[in-house]
Image (cartoon, grey):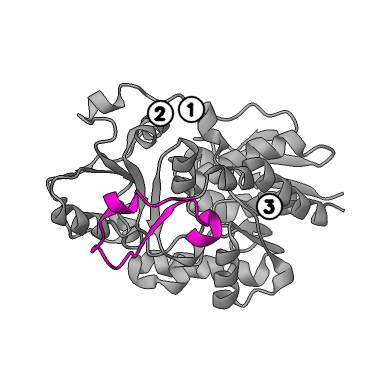
Amino acid sequence: MRKFTINGKFYAQRVTGVQRFAREIVLELDKIAKNIDLELIVPADALDLPVLKNIRIQKSKYRKSIFWEQLWLPLYLLKNRRIGLHLCHVAPIFKPDIVCIHDANVLVNPQWFTRKVCAWYGLIDRLCAKFAKKIVTVSDFSKKELQKSLGIPNLRISSIVEGWQHLNKIVADESTLTRYSLKKDQFYFSLGTRASHKNVRWIFEYAQKHPEQLFVLSGSSNGRIFGKMEESEPRNVKFLGYLSDEEIKLLMQKCKAYILPSFYEGFGLPPLEALSTGAQVIVSDIPVMHEIFGNTVHYIDPHNTNVDIENLLLEPVDSAEIVLKKYSWKNAATSLLEIIKEFAS
């Protein structure tokens, strides 16, 4: 029977959507991955390692780096005759094995990223498409986009889902509103990077037209990845930077609505998280949002700010339970385990 190793570099990274996906998949896999030789190997600088029962944890003597992932890790896998499982989009070029490519954004929208990022991720995606044993992604939309961009045969790519249940383990920080001088139901909230495809410009333009309303933004503004952000925030926009999970949950619970005006997404985890807290949700009218959320959210044109979102929120939507019952980390891990079992024998 074949042996499998999870690339655990995400335990040495700041937690954003991709890292959240990987961490929750590991926790759920550990509950169901019995009678399979499965280990998690992490860099020396990994933090907050989970307590696992069925998945062994191995710690490398090297810290997270390109060297660790592109040279040391594939040599380790080859030496020990193990199949790598890479959950965070990037895999060793010479031994990608099973890799989760979350979306085709860099391939179809290179104008939104720096040249170095386009070159690196474009190379990784193309080599994975050619040499990986299996490609996994997070929505049917992303599956179609990757197949169209990379020519991946249907048998070599599968879509699984994401989940929201990690929020059940997070205790909302009740001091958050006071800390940032906010009041319940008196602000709109948006979580994500200031990358071009996240379309922060929509919120800026809308805020300028509606100075009486307050917008709160959180997330990364890494210019090395996304390029420089030219716009400055209007006075009624607060950019809070990177927040803790406890702060984010509280802001989702207390906001007037959660807004995601993106031009492009592979799944859309933050709106799903917001739905689970009871928040009203406004998302872009793009295909993947309809696939995930159906009629449980409100839709806006990401190219047009001539809309009254307060009136939009008065329109009826379906119960969030329809979506919350459909998506779970357990379902995602179960789908991934079936893929692992295909190669186990």
Note whether residue 109 is visible.
yes
Q: Amino acid at mark 1?
A: Ile
> Could you say whether the residue bearing mark 2 is in a helix, strand or loop?
helix
Mark identifier at residue 170: 1
Disc 1/disc 3 C-alpha distance (Å): 30 Å
* Residue numbers of the magenta segment: 289-317
> Which residue does the numbered mark 2 point to in the structure image?
246
Labels 1, 3: front one: 1
Labels 2, 3: front one: 2
Q: Are marks 2 and 1 in contact (CB under 8 Å)?
A: yes
Disc 2/disc 3 C-alpha distance (Å): 33 Å
Disc 2/disc 1 C-alpha distance (Å): 6 Å
> Could you say whether the residue bearing mark 1 is in a helix, strand or loop?
loop
x then y, percent, for residue 138: 58, 56
The answer to if 147 sits in the magenta stretch is no
Q: Earlier in the sequence, mark 1 or mark 3?
A: 3
Q: Earlier in the sequence, mark 2 or mark 1?
A: 1
x then y, percent, for residue 249: 41, 33
| Above or below, 218 relative to 197 | above
Residue lying at 32% horizontally and 58% vertically, measured from the top left: 195
Q: Amino acid at mark 3?
A: Gly
Note whether residue 81 is visible.
no
Is 326 or 72 nearer to us in this picture? 326
Q: Is residue 338 left or right of residue 76?
A: right
Mark identifier at residue 84: 3
Q: Earlier in the sequence, mark 2 or mark 3?
A: 3
